[in-house]
Image (spheres, rainbow, N blue to C red):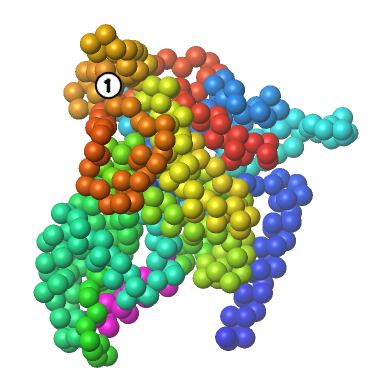
């Protein structure tokens, strides 16, 4: 390492330590990372969370709410990051013709500052204190890329091709990949054709509801579009891999993707997070079938493993020893179910996480799971079907703006009835059929001091930030 590089590194660490000490003593900052897997409603979550922290009338489960004297938005501290467009998203969700806001396509940030009344034995000797909450929003695809850091190109290719062989969306790419001889000399046109076919598959997989759509920058390339670092694809490893072969070049570009795209992002942003919430569309996966549920389980396990602290972990070099203290996994769209079925959805979510959660708990992370709806868009009704009362929900359909009543099917109280067929690779549910409708935001009037209607958003806030308020 050059002397100048070493000096810069030491100086940066000292400045960071001093800044952290100053912030911790006077105006501490809590950094909350928010991400979500496919169709999880991440933008809606952040918008509703901010609105309900600014107007706390619906945050009854946030125990520190009475101590909050004031909350206001401030400019984000990182001037190189876009600001999360809270006002535009809130207007879309709560306007005269409410609609879902645009999904996340890049990293953004928003700062909320809390003025908190003193409490405890010495409350009378101190004045109000300040806490800054920095909310970092980034695409879920970027989070899933973290798992690539511990894999070689060979391992990644073998695992990816094995999964894709079972998916109809990958038929075109698999035919091209199997016909390719990676031992032949690199031809850039062939490499680009393979990368294009692989990218097409990823778009189809995301549209079909699969969770493991990585590398994430293939879907959200930004200014990297067309660059060699995004021009690779998984290939079967040939018996020989000459230095100038297609396979060796794909390996080089895969390694460059990890070192020049994934690692800098997580060093600059992910490594600074204190708390994290991961949103998942568990209901959507159940609707898709057992294979989608198993895909979600495996993907979420990889996500939790990525947060695991430890000096000997391949991740420790990126995180620099700083660990995420709390991780909340939330099943979204709870308003698509009657409240009688919410315990079953939460139990399924907890079971999906059980293996990885045990590892994270052992390593010191505080993890939890719950079901929520950041913006409630339905009302509950009982549906009379041949004399049987079924718990249903009514909402405005996204497709035609008409009101519809939905009974999605009864989720089993035993999560094993969902997880076992998924683990066994069943093609469909044998004894159940789970329906799902796409609802639009409901038209509602917000009284003064009240944020948008939600389900358990206050409980999520209590877990994530309650102890610091």
Residue 114 x %, y %: 65, 35
Q: Is residue 386 visible?
A: yes
Q: Nearer the viewer, residue 288 or 54?
A: 288
Residue 248 x %, y %: 27, 83
- Residue drawn 60% across the image and 48% down it: 366
Residue 450 x %, y %: 52, 19
User: Can you tell which quarter of the image residue 412 is in?
Assistant: top left
Residue 429 x %, y %: 25, 39
Residue 356 magenta? no
Q: Is residue 194 left or right of residue 214?
A: left
Which segment is the magenta one?
Answer: 244-262
For residue 130, above or below residue 243: above
Q: Nearer the viewer, residue 186 or 456?
A: 456
Q: Is residue 234 left or right of residue 107?
A: left
Residue labelled with disc 1: 406
- Residue drawn 56% across the image and 46% down it: 367
Number of numbered callouts drawn: 1
Q: Quadrant of the N terminus?
A: bottom right
Q: Secondary structure at mark 1?
A: strand
- Residue drawn 37% across the image and 16% down it: 380
Judged by its main secondary structure, the magenta piece is helix
User: Can you tell which quarter of the image residue 374 is in?
Assistant: top left
For residue 303, above or below residue 237: above
Q: Is residue 4 left or right of residue 353?
A: right
Q: Nearer the viewer, residue 240 or 253?
A: 240
For residue 118, above or below residue 203: above
- Count neighbours of disc 1 (C-alpha within 10 A) and say few if under 14, some if 14 to 19, many if 20 or more: many
- Residue drawn 70% across the image and 68% down it: 14
Residue 251 magenta? yes
């Amino acid at each position: 390492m050059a002397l100048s590089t070493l000096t810069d590194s030491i100086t940066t660490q000292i400045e960071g330590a001093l800044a952290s000490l100053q912030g911790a003593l006077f105006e501490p900052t809590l950094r909350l990372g928010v991400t979500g897997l496919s169709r999880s409603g991440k933008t809606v979550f952040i918008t509703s969370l901010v609105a309900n922290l600014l107007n706390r009338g619906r945050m009854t489960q946030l125990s520190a709410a009475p101590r909050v004297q004031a909350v206001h938005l401030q400019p984000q501290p990182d001037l190189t990051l876009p600001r999360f467009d809270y006002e535009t998203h809130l207007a879309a969700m709560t306007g005269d013709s409410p609609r879902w806001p645009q999904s996340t396509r890049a990293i953004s940030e928003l700062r909320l500052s809390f003025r908190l009344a003193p409490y405890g034995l010495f409350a009378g000797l101190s004045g109000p204190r300040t806490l800054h909450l920095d909310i970092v929003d980034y695409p879920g695809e970027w989070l899933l890329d973290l798992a690539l850091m511990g894999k070689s190109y060979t391992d990644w290719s073998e695992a990816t091709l094995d999964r894709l062989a079972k998916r109809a969306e990958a038929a075109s790419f698999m035919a091209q990949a199997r016909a390719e001889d990676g031992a032949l000399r690199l031809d850039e046109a062939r490499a680009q054709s393979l990368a294009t076919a692989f990218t097409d598959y990823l778009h189809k997989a995301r549209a079909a509801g699969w969770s493991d759509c990585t590398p994430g920058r293939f879907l959200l390339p930004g200014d990297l579009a067309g660059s060699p670092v995004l021009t690779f694809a998984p290939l079967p490893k040939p018996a020989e891999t000459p230095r100038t072969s297609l396979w060796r070049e794909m390996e080089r570009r895969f390694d460059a993707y990890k070192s020049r795209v994934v690692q800098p992002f997580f060093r600059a942003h992910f490594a600074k997070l204190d708390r994290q919430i991961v949103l998942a569309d568990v209901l959507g996966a159940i609707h898709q079938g057992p294979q989608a549920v198993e895909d979600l389980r495996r993907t979420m396990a990889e996500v939790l493993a990525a947060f695991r602290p430890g000096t000997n972990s391949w991740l420790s070099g990126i995180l620099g020893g700083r660990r995420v203290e709390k991780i909340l996994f939330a099943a979204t769209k709870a308003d698509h179910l009657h409240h009688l079925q919410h315990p079953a959805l939460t139990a399924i979510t907890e079971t999906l996480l059980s293996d990885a959660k045990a590892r994270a708990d052992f390593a010191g992370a505080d993890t939890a799971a719950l079901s929520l709806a950041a913006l409630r868009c339905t009302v509950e009704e009982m549906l009379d079907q041949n004399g049987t009362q079924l718990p249903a929900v009514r909402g405005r359909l996204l497709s035609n703006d008409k009101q519809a009543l939905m009974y999605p099917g009864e989720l089993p109280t035993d999560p094993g009835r969902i997880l076992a067929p998924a683990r066994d690779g069943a093609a469909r549910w044998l004894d159940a059929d789970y329906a799902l409708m796409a609802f639009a935001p409901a038209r509602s009037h917000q009284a003064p001091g009240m944020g948008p209607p939600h389900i358990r958003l206050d409980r999520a806030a209590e877990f994530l930030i309650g102890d610091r308020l």
